């Protein structure tokens, strides 16, 4: 029994990916090394974040010089560079696209063989950093379809169904990695003493309904009437509780385990909302569908939405099936 406990307690991420793939095909080996690289980026960022408070100004501004005379990078710039350097060495990824870079970043030395594109938000919820609160990284992997691209990355302007893997890393009291390669959703916790992500929950299923609603109600008068209708409904019915942390990864993580809904609807100033389709909404939509939940723009599944540009934004309603459907019903009523 002890042996089995040890066995269970020590399923590392890399072993888990290989078990999931159950094959030694080239694709399987690619995916497992891609996931290992993402885990490495997560560990590096996690380590840097845990020391950030000790280093003058790491949290704040770019271009500063710290006590050791090294220039201090703002956290999101640092995290963006971590992903680039980690994938430069992998050989598999020819192109990276992130919230921090206007254009995709090509790794020419990988391009003859690199068949994948990594899309990511290196630090999601970056305003939380200034107060030492949780942030995250969001990622997904797509097969590269346009190698001799002119930099416009048109092949990326396709639906989220093209993702072959997606997930996030949550930098909270513990660092966690949650991922899916289309075979369920699994979470891992970083054991800092081992430097390994250890399996904590397998085949996570989101409750069909949950108590949490997570939305920035400060935007109330910026929303369409239908969203206000939904919030009024929630206020008038028992069993709802509000939670909003200002970092999508953290808010989504809570809902994945406890059920409920996260919303970032369009506003008067930003009719498409704030969140980006390709590297924020679509990866989480991939996860939530794998966990038995839903993600919607309000009128369409997020995974069916096609962006018109790399940094396109989308309204996002994501979480438990019944709760997403309830929000949608208010929207269709007002159409
Ligand atoms: P960021 O990627 O620039 O950090 O912005 C995304 C973040 C999300 O993590 C979070 O859900 C949202 O912005 C919060 O926005 P607001 O402060 O408008 O409520
Ligand atoms: Mg972000």
Image (cartoon, grey):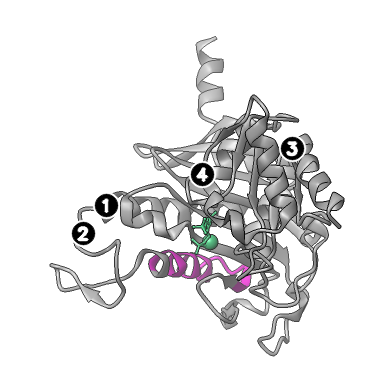
- Taking the magenta stretch, the answer to whether it contains residue 3 is no
The CA span between labels 4 and 1 is 25 Å
Q: Is residue 275 left or right of residue 44?
A: right
- For label 3, the residue is 323
Kindly state the secondary structure of the residue where label 2 is placed: loop
Kindly state the secondary structure of the residue where label 3 is placed: helix
Q: Counting other residues with Cα less than 10 Å from the Cα at mark 3, is it few (<14), some (14-19), or many (20 or more)?
A: many
What residue range appears in magenta? 78-96
- Taking the magenta stretch, the answer to whether it contains residue 95 is yes
Q: Are marks 4 and 2 in contact (CB under 8 Å)?
A: no
Q: Counting other residues with Cα less than 10 Å from the Cα at mark 4, is it few (<14), some (14-19), or many (20 or more)?
A: some
- For label 4, the residue is 244
Q: Earlier in the sequence, mark 3 or mark 4?
A: 4
The CA span between labels 1 and 3 is 39 Å
Kindly state the secondary structure of the residue where label 1 is placed: helix
Judge depth for marks 1 and 3 and give the one in front: 3
Label 4 CB sits under 8 Å from any ligand 1 atom: yes
Q: Is residue 216 left or right of residue 335?
A: left
The answer to whether any part of residue 48 appears in the image is no
Q: Which mark is residue 264?
A: none
Q: Are marks 2 and 1 in contact (CB under 8 Å)?
A: yes
Judge depth for marks 2 and 3 and give the one in front: 3
Q: Residue at x 62, y 66 (%)?
A: 119
The answer to whether any part of residue 9 appears in the image is yes
Percent across and percent down for residue 182 are 76, 46
- For label 1, the residue is 51
């Amino acid at each position: 029994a002890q042996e089995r406990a040890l066995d269970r307690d020590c399923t590392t991420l890399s072993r888990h990916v290989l078990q999931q793939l159950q094959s030694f095909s080239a694709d399987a080996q690619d995916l497992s090394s891609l996931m290992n690289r993402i885990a490495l980026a997560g560990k590096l960022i996690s380590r840097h974040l845990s020391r950030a408070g000790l280093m003058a100004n790491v949290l704040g501004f770019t271009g500063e010089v710290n006590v050791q005379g090294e220039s201090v990078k703002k956290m999101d710039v640092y995290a963006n560079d971590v992903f680039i350097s980690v994938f430069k060495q992998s050989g598999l990824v020819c192109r990276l696209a992130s919230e921090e870079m206007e254009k995709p970043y090509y790794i020419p030395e990988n391009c003859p063989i690199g068949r994948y594109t990594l899309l990511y938000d290196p630090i999601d919820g970056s305003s939380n950093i200034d107060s030492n609160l949780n942030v995250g990284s969001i990622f997904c992997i797509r097969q590269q379809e346009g190698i001799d691209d002119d930099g416009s990355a048109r092949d990326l302007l396709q639906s989220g169904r093209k993702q072959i893997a997606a997930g996030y890393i949550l930098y909270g009291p513990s660092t966690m990695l949650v991922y899916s390669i289309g075979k369920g959703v699994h979470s891992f916790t970083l054991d800092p003493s081992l430097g390994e992500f250890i399996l904590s929950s397998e085949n996570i299923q989101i409750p069909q309904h949950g108590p949490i609603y997570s939305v920035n109600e400060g935007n109330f008068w910026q929303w369409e009437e239908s969203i206000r209708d939904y919030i009024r409904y929630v206020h008038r019915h028992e069993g709802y509780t509000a939670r909003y942390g200002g970092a999508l990864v953290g808010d989504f993580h809570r809902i994945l385990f406890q059920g409920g809904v996260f919303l970032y609807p369009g506003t008067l100033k930003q009719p498409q909302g704030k969140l980006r389709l390709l590297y924020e909404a679509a990866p989480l939509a991939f996860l939530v569908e794998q966990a038995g939940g839903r993600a919607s723009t309000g009128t369409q599944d997020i995974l069916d939405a096609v962006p018109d540009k790399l940094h396109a934004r989308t309204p996002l309603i994501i979480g438990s099936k019944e709760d997403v459907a309830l929000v949608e019903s208010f929207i269709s009523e007002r159409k």
